[in-house]
Amino acid sequence: MSSGGAEPAQADGRGGADGSGDPGGRPHARELQGPPVWQSSRPGSIYDYIRVASFSLGPDGRIDQWSERAEHMLDIPARYALGKDPVEAFVPRELRATGRRKVSEILDGREWTGLVPYRREEGSDADGLAEIYVMPSRDENGERAAVCLVVDVRALRGIETDLAASQAVFGQSPMGFTLFGTDLKLLRVNERFATVFGGPASKYRGCGPHDFLPRSEAERMTVALRRVLETGEPVTEMQLVGMAPGEEDRRRWSVSLYRLHGASGRPIGVAALAADVTGRRRAEREAASARRNLALLNEAGARIGNSLDLETTARTLLDVAVPQFCDLASVDLYQGLLAGDEAPPGMSDGSAELRRVAFASAVSDAPLPTAPGDAPGPVAVGAVHRYPFNSPCAGALRTAHAQIIPGRESDEGPELGAVVQSTLAVPMVARDTVVGLVQFSRAKGSEPFGERDTALAVELAARAAVCIDNARLYRREHERALILQRSLLPPGDPEAAGLDIACRYLPGTTATEVGGDWFDVIELPGHRTALVVGDVMGRGLRAAVAMGELRTAVRTLALLDLEPAEVLSALDEIARGLGGDGEGRSSSARSARGRSGSAEGAGEPRRSARTADLSEVYLATCVYAVYDPITRRCTFANAGHLPPVLVEDGEDALLLDVPPGMPLGVGGEPFEEIEVELPDGALLALYTDGLVESRHHPLEEGLQAFRTALSHADRPLEDACDQVLSAMDTSHGEDDIALLMARVHGLPKDAVGDWSLAPEARSVARARELARDQLTDWGLQELVDTTELLVSELVTNALRHGHGEIRLRLLLDRTLVCEVWDADLAQPRRRRARDTDEGGRGLQLVGLLSQGWGSRRTPRGKTVWFELALPDGESVAMDPAEALLSLF
């Protein structure tokens, strides 16, 4: 009964400890054949676990033997037990009568089993409960005695509880629970395992991993079991893949292994817990796919649409998709849209011409026909092609719905069947308009396209389609703005009296929008010339329209022959009206003035960003100069523009100190003007900020470089203009560049006739005589009669309607100009005379015979002028007598 009990084994000494017997250490039946031997087993047998002890009763009913196991288990020393009546010593008083009766029965030869409460020491209360097995015996004298086996009830109850709990865990666990013996064969499986693989649980006793797992997975399982059995180190969450009977889909299990030990600590096998993680794995894959798709959409949002170039946008889409989403892809856009057509024919049925604008592949350098029904052979980038009406790609274009096209084996291109597994044909739809088709393809061995992939592909194509359509709309607007801008610029070789003109206009790159830069050369009465350079703030079509409106306004104001400061003041009012918010003034002007601290700006209500943008385009800078070739003087006025540059012979270039003023559209500030004398040979340059300013250098550095380039521009004007542009940084393309250069030579003195006339009647004849003599000197006898008649009319009107001294001036350049000055401020008004009127036909006659006529104010009166074309030997001028008669 002690822990050192012996067990029989084979004669050769092999027992359960060396693994030849069963996992419990018991020898097989075949090993019991032959002479047995006694072998000492290690502590930890089942008897130790259930705590069995023994003692014996003599014929007198007293304890005569008390084992050491009883002493340790019951915690009663032998000195308190030997020679004692067990009933008197250990049984409570109220149970002693029953106890004596039972002992008498035992000594009479009857077996007995029952529960007996006991006290651990004499005089102590009962604090133990023992289950006693009493077996009658005889001593050496033949007298009745008894052998008693004692089991601690608490140990038994623990064993029962442990067995019940073990059975509950093993049998009711939702996970597969298996026990492998030391020979790696199954000892036991639970019902969950049997349910998955089919059959009763007993069917798998003695089976190995190869009986229910694929070969590769079974080998992995066997290696893991052997390692756990040998090292004792557990294995957690080992992933195994297999097929359950009757199912087509593979399952994935997460298996944990740990070694089992007996009570003595020796290994008796390996326990395996297996959880079906197929759903979790699928969910993890879906979550990973969703994260990947989200990251892909994030990348697409960050990269697609950064360029307004159609081809660049298409290439960026493929850079995002390959190889993160697919293995090869291509983008086709409608040829009509690329050419600028609004509604290309055939778009509705998908049969219109398309151009392959981009292709990318992670598996092949050359394009492949990625879908059945494509045009014969691969389509190269830049090639124009069509999809047959019944092809899937044409169907996708026609229906505006994505289509999954499975791969195919092809005799025409064996590489197609070897490479492409499936293709997604996704129409590119922007603003309910199909602009093209993108094809995503995956190679053999890749996961086929699913619903999530289709949704992602549609989203990618839609984003790219919107960006491509934006680029198309921008390009269309850019081209229109460019056409408008070019149409509003002056001709390439403008002419002016007393000036040689050279001009250049360099638009920004195609990546930048059209700007609002403009320049103009306007001929004024008296052979004077107005030079204008301006820059509308903002870009795009609105800036070009604003530039056209302001340029037209400048021309209109210039022909009224106003002073430069007056022109800019009137232009400022026009700009404020164009950019106004319904109250006659621009919000930009209010904000600009409000920033200066005025009370008017402090209480300004906030407006929407859109309204602010609409008014912002009408802010502009402008410099306006009027040159008189007779006096060689030029009058400047500036509205927030960069100062003009003047270069005199032998001198360095100089920035003219023209008061800058406020930009047009701000309002509220008067403009100043200065007058500068320009010697013959001087060079005057007007320009926009795109010439001297860029992100690569500051404005001051650009102005200095411009002055240096002008200081060495002593060659012919056209060559000098090109030299300046080549010396400056004009390739940045950030802004438009306008440059207007003029070289001064003035009118020679012999081309001007200037006389003062007294305010008397005989001055009319004197004026005719002076005009006749001057024209004769110039060799313009053909114009004498007409000039005399018209001069007579103007001088007569000056005498009749004006007052003060009269001045007559004739100017000869490309045309003949006659001016009559008087001190009256009232402007002449042309009217139609009635047949019965004796007068009132003078200005009608002037208008009939001259090329042009007009009137302008002067500081001390007004000037009335007319202009005659010089004889060219081909055209015949109207006879003055016939013209006079035609008025009646």
Image (tube, rainbow, N blue to C red):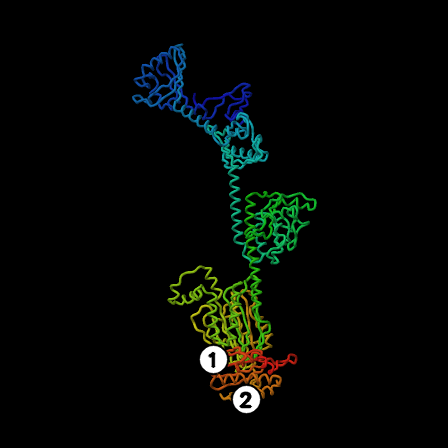
In-front residue for pair 409/664: 664
In-front residue for pair 563/267: 563
Q: Which residue is mark 2?
A: 765
Task: Kindly state the secondary structure of the residue where label 1 is placed.
Answer: loop
Q: Is residue 125 left or right of residue 660?
A: left
The quadrant of the rendering that contains the C terminus is bottom right
Q: Disc 1 versus disc 2: distance between alpha carbons?
A: 24 Å
Q: Is residue 602 above or below residue 390?
A: below
In-front residue for pair 861/651: 861
**Residue 464 in the image: x percent, y percent?**
56, 53
Task: Kindly state the secondary structure of the residue where label 2 is placed.
Answer: helix
Q: Is residue 647 above or below residue 457?
A: below
Counting other residues with Cα less than 10 Å from the Cα at mark 1, is it few (<14), some (14-19), or many (20 or more)? few
Q: Amino acid at mark 1?
A: Ala
Q: Which residue is mark 1?
A: 826
Q: Amino acid at mark 2?
A: Ala
Q: Is residue 820 above or below residue 130?
A: below
Counting other residues with Cα less than 10 Å from the Cα at mark 2, is it few (<14), some (14-19), or many (20 or more)? some
**Residue 720 in the image: x percent, y percent?**
58, 75
Q: Is residue 813 visible?
A: no
Which residue is rendered at x = 40% and y = 67% of the image?
596
**Residue 417 in the image: x percent, y percent?**
66, 44
Q: Is residue 88 left or right of residue 353?
A: left
